[in-house]
Image: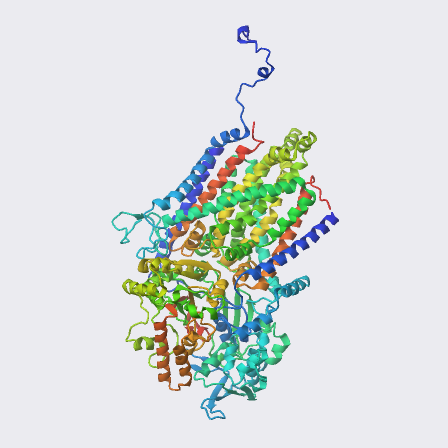
């Protein structure tokens, strides 16, 4: 088990390295420079700016400096937020995104698994239809429409929650809901499908024949096996929630990391782009690892081999 | 059974969608309709006592020498006093300096040496309001030297190059090849004593005070700056010292800044406002919602939102920041193409085609469809600059043109066609369909809408098909600077209150002239304004320059931007928004 | 017990083949699935909705009296069912069925032009996802070992790169438009499918019937085609129905960020994005594209359910 984890971590680092290289050279291939705004600085100033960020050196030299800094955990100084380290920007904004993302995922997972399981068990009843209806709304309405419409009705018209901001618990409700809704839908649909599969398996019939109680069957045998496919999508769900958070963060004015992604790409802030990309990549790799480990824990049939 | 329920659900999903539709419509009509005649109490604003929340956009850095955005300068105006500042009529008044006088230099040229007498007893305070030190002339000398320090790569270093030897020093320090050695001590500013600052100019500069007012020229307290380090200074409230009417207490990047009244400021007795929150919004719906629920007091609004407020009878305010919007045209001629690396030979090189396009676009319709607000069809290029013979330069230009705008507000298809015929001859084409123009458009729904409207107008009034090329803003700028485009829509805002800030742009050597326009006469005309000391005669020269621009048409001006904003009823007065003063909230008063 | 007359029996003869003949017509897997799909009314309604969406998207812009980029200056933001007053069509009785947008363009025509773009993006991406994911995941899961590790590493590298970055880079490198979005979406969209297929195959491989087939000497191709894929199909179909909404979603999401299709082209996402800016003033400009998006999603989802029930080998019999 330990050997497996170590091996996975080693692969993760390799992946990160490839990602770093790819990001670096792809960014340099894109036309435009971050230093030209509406107004163009004088050639001397432009040269000074490039020197300040080490962009005056040949790309291959820049690359080795960049890799060296990354290895030391230094993601560099942001270009658009002058003099501010990327580490600091991530440290300040990621906890907010994480809180938002975690709330959204917890909401989506718990509600999704419950809805999906209930829908499967009560297949064909009004409960099934209702839960599938929620799932369909979640899948069918883009978060920017859902967020804007919820905000207008719940915050402006009914004044139940604040319109925007981040700080009080009330302020986190709408964004978590808007962000988690589409994942909830995915989870509940998958859960329903998988639960139906499991319920038709022979061992469930065996358990029933043995006279186990309905609750015990569902809890001990069905749920645990049905959660399997859901766990495989935790990784992608985390990814979806974090990229999706840009829209939600901008609708609800939340100072999270999501908005820096798109903004840094639009501003061509090389250091912030590579910094956030590497950070994001590392996060995803970690999530996948955890998911695979969980997979082994939940399904004893799968052995984690080193 | 199951099937029936699913069908029901299908119907329910549809019904909810439709219900959502009528609901939106109804609430709009009913809920707001009741308040039509009753303005008071509609939007009482934020609830925090003595505090207001205003909208502000981009905030990247708070080290004054590194600032570039008007929004950053707006906050800087509240946190730091430069030597002078602008009052509520945009007139220069003393800030850190109480008085000043000018004298001739050694060669006897008038107004070349200026002495500023600083306000004694002004204090530097930290984020908590503790007094750290006195504000002295050395703080200005230090800040300006840092502005000229190539390591900082300050974009607005140019403001310090009006001082004697400053440009030479900057070039030398930047390692420009062949630049002679110049010491920082030789640059034309020094502290005669703690409260006397002397500056010597490189060239005569009638608008020096406009330069010194610029927030980038604010002082910096050297010991503190060196303590926190150049990299960290200005990145957090506790990494700056303040000498202005407010001090910063909180800064969440890309989200909010809080400034609190500085009791040590010399005129603090007249400041009634305790706190200003500067909040950033990226979504216009959210902004409007926040205003309506009392989470913000001042917001900029879109044309559509304006009509909503007008329907409610709520007052909408309007101001001009001085932004003039126009199409850059790539006018490089075939024989000059070799001088520009990567430049494109564009059909826009034909003056007659540019004129045809200027006549074919309908500026008023552009405004009423794309912007739906008070934007003004450009009568001339330069906006927001004070005039001599008239209140503004723009009015002076129109008056000189016999009361007519230089660019028609409405399309004139007949004239456009006449010029098009000439353009076809210029370009050696037989048919209008051979004209190949693309509108370089930076992404953003308003830019894209504009391009589509212009495309349609050119199709209708000129019979030519232009394409639209949408790219990211950085790529658009790169292509603009490389002159690899036909037409690119852009805006220009003045940095200081003198026509030079706008009209210098189109001289051949200007780094912001991306059109390839290089007219010796225009260059000479702008050069001649530098030696003209009579304000009226000097203005006349700038008017001539405007007319020459309209004649040679390297740019096609489209509109002058007017910005709409609403203010909650919490604010009763003292809120200023003027050219060069994006916000001036220092003397804002609140309802009890 | 009832007496059965002897005459009702007949001798079938010596032919061994006829002796074992099953007189009931044989039903293939596909025929059986189709039969059950056709009898599912909800799924059929959804097929009709999707078909209508496609029909309208193909023909409405052709039949409409208005061009989708034609601007009527005097008819900005008019409501639904407004008779056109533009000099070019006045008196013809032409109507803006869905009203016009902020530039005075006929929304009905634009919605169906947008439908073309959105549906093309959705179908193209779903097809690419399906095949790429099935092949990649199937190979990786079936062969396992070093190949699996290598394939999963490659997958993780691609998955680690934020989607937006790929899109923006491609937008700049390739000419902006529908193809770019499809390529960009497909580059990352197949990953969840590949993961899912791999996960399923890995789990199935350890089940008894696979071991039995292996023991009986089934070839690799037969194993994948007859045993592994059909048993993975139900989950794959759920995934592919979800990948159609997610393609339309991604397109809408990119539009919201200003990275969607470029003018003059429009899509449901870009129409919704324009509509949302003024949805309090002109709600129909948001609701119409939003309903189109949602209805299409709904149809695909329910149709997917029907397909799932029809294809599921466990529900056969």
- Counting the numbered discs, the total is 0
Res A229 visible? no
User: Along the line of sight, which residue is nearer the eye, B69 or C21?
Assistant: C21
User: Along the line of sight, which residue is nearer the eye, A168 or A53?
Assistant: A53
Res A56 visible? yes
Question: In the figure, C57 relative to A155: above or below?
Answer: above
Question: In the figure, C41 relative to C289: above or below?
Answer: above
Q: Report the side of C177 relative to C130 (left or right).
A: left
Q: Report the side of A80 relative to B298 (left or right).
A: right
Q: Position of residue B364 (x, y in %)?
A: 32, 64
* Residue drawn at x 42%, y 83% as measured from the top left: B530
Q: Report the side of A209 relative to B378 (left or right).
A: right
**Colour scheme:** rainbow
Question: In the figure, C60 relative to B260: above or below?
Answer: above
Q: Quadrant of residue B8?
A: top left
Q: Position of residue C127 (x, y in %)?
A: 52, 42
User: Along the line of sight, which residue is nearer the eye, A75 or A90?
Assistant: A75
Q: Quadrant of residue C62?
A: top left
* Residue drawn at x 50%, y 64% as measured from the top left: B474
Q: Quadrant of the C terminus of chain B?
A: bottom left
Question: In the figure, C52 relative to A278: above or below?
Answer: above
Q: Quadrant of residue B463?
A: bottom left
* Residue drawn at x 67%, y 37% as measured from the top left: C205
Q: Position of residue A137 (x, y in %)?
A: 48, 45
Q: Position of residue A248 (x, y in %)?
A: 51, 55
């Amino acid at each position: 088990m330990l050997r497996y984890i170590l091996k996975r971590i080693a692969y993760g680092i390799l992946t990160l390295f490839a990602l770093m290289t790819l990001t670096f050279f792809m960014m340099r291939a894109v036309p435009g420079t971050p230093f030209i705004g509406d107004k163009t600085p004088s050639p001397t100033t432009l040269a000074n700016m490039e020197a300040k960020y080490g962009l005056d050196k040949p790309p291959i030299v820049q690359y080795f400096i960049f890799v060296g800094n990354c290895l030391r955990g230094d993601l560099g100084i942001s270009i658009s937020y002058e003099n501010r380290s990327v580490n600091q920007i991530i440290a300040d904004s990621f906890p907010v995104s994480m809180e938002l993302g975690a709330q959204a995922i917890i909401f989506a997972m718990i509600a999704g698994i419950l809805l999906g399981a209930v829908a499967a068990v009560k297949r064909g009843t009004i409960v099934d239809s209702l839960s599938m209806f929620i799932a369909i709304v979640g899948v069918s309405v883009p978060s920017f429409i859902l967020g804007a419409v919820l905000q207008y009705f719940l915050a402006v018209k009914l004044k139940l929650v604040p319109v925007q901001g981040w700080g009080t618990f009330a302020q986190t409700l709408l964004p978590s809901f808007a962000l988690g809704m589409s994942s909830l839908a995915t989870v509940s649909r998958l859960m329903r499908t998988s639960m139906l599969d499991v319920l038709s398996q022979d061992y469930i019939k065996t358990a029933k024949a043995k006279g186990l109680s309905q609750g015990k069957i569902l809890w001990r045998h069905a749920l645990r096996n049905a959660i399997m496919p859901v766990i495989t999508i935790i990784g992608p769900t985390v990814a979806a929630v974090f990229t999706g958070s840009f829209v939600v963060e901008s609708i609800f004015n939340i100072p999270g990391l999501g908005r820096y992604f798109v903004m840094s790409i639009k501003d061509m802030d090389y250091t912030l782009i590579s910094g956030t990309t590497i950070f994001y990549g590392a996060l995803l790799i970690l999530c996948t690892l955890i998911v695979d480990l969980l997979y082994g824990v939940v399904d004893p049939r799968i052995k984690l081999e080193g | 059974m199951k099937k029936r329920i699913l069908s029901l659900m299908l119907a329910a999903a549809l019904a909810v969608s439709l219900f959502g539709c009528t609901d939106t419509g109804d609430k709009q009509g009913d809920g707001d309709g009741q308040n039509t005649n009753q303005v008071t109490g509609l939007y009482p604003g934020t609830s925090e006592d003595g505090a207001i929340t205003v909208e502000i956009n981009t905030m990247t850095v708070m080290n004054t020498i590194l600032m570039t955005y008007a929004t950053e300068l707006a906050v800087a105006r509240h946190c730091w006093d430069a030597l002078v500042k602008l009052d509520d009529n945009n007139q220069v008044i003393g800030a850190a300096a109480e008085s000043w006088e000018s004298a001739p230099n050694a060669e006897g040229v008038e107004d070349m040496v200026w002495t500023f007498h600083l306000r004694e007893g002004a204090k530097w305070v930290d984020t908590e309001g503790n007094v750290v030190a006195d504000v002295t002339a050395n703080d200005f000398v230090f800040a300006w030297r840092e502005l000229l320090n190539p390591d900082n790569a300050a974009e607005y270093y140019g403001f310090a190059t009006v001082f004697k030897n400053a440009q030479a020093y900057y070039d030398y320090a930047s390692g420009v090849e062949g630049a002679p050695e110049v010491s920082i001590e030789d640059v034309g500013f020094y502290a005669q004593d703690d409260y006397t600052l002397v500056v010597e100019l490189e060239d005569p500069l009638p608008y020096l005070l406009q330069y010194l007012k610029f927030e980038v020229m604010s002082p910096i307290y050297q010991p503190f700056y060196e303590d926190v380090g150049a990299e960290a200074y200005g990145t957090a409230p506790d990494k700056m010292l303040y000498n202005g009417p407010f001090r910063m207490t909180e800064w969440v990047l890309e989200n909010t800044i809080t400034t609190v009244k500085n009791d040590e400021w010399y005129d603090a007795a007249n400041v009634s406002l305790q706190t200003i929150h500067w909040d950033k919004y990226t979504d216009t719906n959210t902004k409007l919602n926040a205003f309506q629920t009392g989470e913000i007091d001042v917001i900029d609004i879109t044309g559509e939102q304006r009509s909503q407020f007008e329907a409610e009878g709520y007052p909408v305010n309007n101001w001009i920041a001085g932004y003039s919007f126009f199409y850059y045209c790539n006018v490089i001629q075939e024989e000059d193409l070799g001088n520009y690396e990567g430049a494109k030979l564009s059909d826009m090189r034909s003056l007659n085609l540019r004129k045809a396009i200027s006549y074919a676009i309908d500026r008023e319709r552009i405004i009423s469809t794309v912007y739906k607000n008070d934007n003004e069809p450009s009568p001339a290029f330069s906006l927001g600059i004070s005039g001599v013979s008239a209140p503004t330069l723009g009015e002076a230009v129109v008056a000189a043109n016999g009361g007519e705008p230089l660019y028609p507000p409405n399309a004139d298809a007949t004239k456009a066609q006449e010029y098009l015929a000439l353009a076809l001859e210029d370009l050696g084409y037989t048919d209008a369909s051979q004209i190949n123009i693309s509108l370089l458009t930076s992404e953003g729904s308003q830019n894209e809408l504009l391009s589509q409207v212009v495309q349609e107008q050119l199709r209708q009034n000129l019979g030519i098909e232009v394409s639209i090329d949408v790219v990211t803003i950085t790529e658009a700028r790169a292509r603009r600077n490389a002159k690899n485009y036909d037409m690119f829509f852009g805006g220009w805002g003045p940095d200081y209150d003198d026509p030079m800030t706008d009209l210098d742009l189109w001289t051949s050597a200007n780094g912001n002239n991306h059109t390839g326009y290089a007219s010796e006469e225009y260059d000479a005309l702008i050069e001649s304004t530098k030696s003209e000391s009579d304000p009226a005669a000097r203005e006349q020269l700038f008017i001539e320059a405007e007319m020459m621009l309209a004649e040679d048409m390297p740019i096609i001006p489209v509109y002058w931007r007017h910005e709409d904003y609403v203010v909650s009823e919490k604010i009763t007065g003292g809120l200023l928004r003027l050219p060069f003063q994006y916000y001036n909230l220092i003397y804002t008063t609140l309802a009890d | 017990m009832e007496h059965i007359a002897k005459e009702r029996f007949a001798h079938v003869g010596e032919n061994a083949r006829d002796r074992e003949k099953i007189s009931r017509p044989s039903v293939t897997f596909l025929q059986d699935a189709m039969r059950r799909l056709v009898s599912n009314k909800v799924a059929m309604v959804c097929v009709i909705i999707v078909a209508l969406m496609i029909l309208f998207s193909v023909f409405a812009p052709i039949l409409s009296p208005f061009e989708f980029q034609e601007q009527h200056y005097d008819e900005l933001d008019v409501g639904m069912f407004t008779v056109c007053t533009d000099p070019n069509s006045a008196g013809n009785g032409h109507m803006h069925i869905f009203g016009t947008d902020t530039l005075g363009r006929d929304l009905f025509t634009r919605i169906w032009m947008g439908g073309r773009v959105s549906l093309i993006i959705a179908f193209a991406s779903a097809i690419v996802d399906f095949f790429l994911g099935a092949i990649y995941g199937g190979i990786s899961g079936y062969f396992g070992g070093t190949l699996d590790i290598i394939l999963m590493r490659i997958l993780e590298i691609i998955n680690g790169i934020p989607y937006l970055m790929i899109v923006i880079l491609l937008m700049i490198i390739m000419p902006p438009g529908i193809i770019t979005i499809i390529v960009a979406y497909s580059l990352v969209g197949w990953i969840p499918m590949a993961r899912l297929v791999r996960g399923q195959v890995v789990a199935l491989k350890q089940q008894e019937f696979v071991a039995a087939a292996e023991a009986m000497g089934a070839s690799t191709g037969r194993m994948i085609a007859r045993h592994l894929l059909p048993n993975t199909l139900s989950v794959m179909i759920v995934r592919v129905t979800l990948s159609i909404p997610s393609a339309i979603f991604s397109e809408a999401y990119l539009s919201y960020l200003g990275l969607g299709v470029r003018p003059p082209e429009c899509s449901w996402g870009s129409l919704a994005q324009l509509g949302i800016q003024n949805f309090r003033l002109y709600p129909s400009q948001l609701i119409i594209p939003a309903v189109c998006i949602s209805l299409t999603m709904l149809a695909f989802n329910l149709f997917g359910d029907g397909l799932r029930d029809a294809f599921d080998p466990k529900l056969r019999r």
